[in-house]
Image (cartoon, helix red, strand yellow):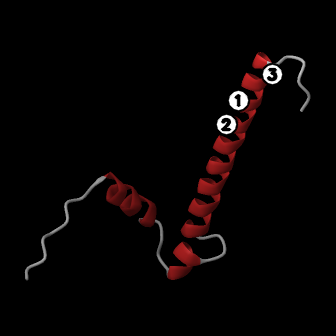
């Protein structure tokens, strides 16, 4: 069975761009490596989105029931 060459997509292009500055495994997997930086930023964005969603929900409740307590 012959393997087909996978067509490049945007994610692969972004990974290639991010990895151009990585010269050693430490640059990718180390304490301040690329993987840790990406994970941190992804988690921060997810938490910020969750917080915004939560706060937006509280505003809607306050508008519906102005005398309700938190």
| Residue in view at x 15 percent, y 69 percent | 5
Q: Quadrant of the C terminus?
A: top right
- Residue 10 is left or right of residue 32, and the answer is left
**Callout 1–callout 2 Cβ contact below 8 Å:** yes
User: Which numbered disc, 3 or 1, marks the residue that appears first in the sequence?
Assistant: 1
Reply above or below: 22 against 46: below
The alpha-carbon separation of the residues under discs 3 and 1 comes to 10 Å
Reply above or below: 42 against 5: above
Q: Position of residue 18 (x, y in %)?
A: 45, 60
Q: Secondary structure at mark 1?
A: helix
Q: Which residue is mark 1?
A: 56
The residue carrying pointer 2 sits among few (fewer than 14), some (14 to 19) or many (20 or more) residues within 10 Å by Cα, namely few
Q: Which residue is mark 2?
A: 53
Badge number at residue 5:
none
Q: Nearer the viewer, mark 3 or mark 1?
A: 3
The alpha-carbon separation of the residues under discs 3 and 2 comes to 14 Å
| Residue in view at x 61 percent, y 68 percent | 36
| Residue in view at x 40 percent, y 61 percent | 15
Q: Which residue is mark 3?
A: 62
């Amino acid at each position: 069975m012959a393997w087909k060459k996978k067509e490049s997509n945007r994610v692969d292009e972004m990974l290639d761009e991010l990895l151009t500055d990585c010269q050693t495994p430490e640059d990718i997997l180390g304490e301040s490596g690329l993987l840790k930086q990406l994970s941190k930023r992804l988690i921060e964005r997810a938490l910020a989105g969750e917080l915004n969603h939560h706060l937006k929900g509280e505003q809607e409740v306050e508008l519906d029931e102005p005398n309700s307590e938190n």
